[in-house]
Amino acid sequence: MTSNSQEGPAKKAPHLTRRAYSVPEFCECYRISIRGAYEEIAAGRLKIRKLGRRTLIATEDAEAWFASLASPQAA
């Protein structure tokens, strides 16, 4: 194997791990529409952070939002 082989996601340096998503990135990752994301934000269920005009969603806030979703009940 050569040293030019591509590294997988697990081999990335710790300082390169994702800390936040843009709204479109969040929507792609969590399979939610942009409209749905902004509805969650407006309802206060999804926390955002602003950097100038840019809206960011911290990874821990995205995970907390996802964990708060209702799971289907077993029949």
Image: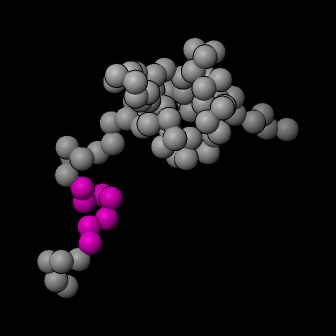
Determine if the magenta segment contains residue 35: no
Number of callouts in the render? 0
- Name the image colouring: one colour
Determine if the magenta segment contains residue 10: yes
- Residue 15 is situated, as x and y percent measured from the top left of the image, at 20, 43
Rendered view: 20 above or below 39: below
Residue most extreme to the front = 53
Magenta stretch? Answer: 6-12
- Residue 18 is situated, as x and y percent measured from the top left of the image, at 33, 42
- Residue 44 is situated, as x and y percent measured from the top left of the image, at 58, 14
Q: Quadrant of the N terminus?
A: bottom left
User: Which residue is depicted at the point 79% across and 38% down?
Assistant: 74
User: Which residue is depicted at the point 75% across and 36% down?
Assistant: 72
Residue 60: in sight, yes or no?
no
User: Which residue is depicted at the point 61% across and 16% down?
Assistant: 42
User: Which residue is depicted at the point 65% across and 23% down?
Assistant: 39
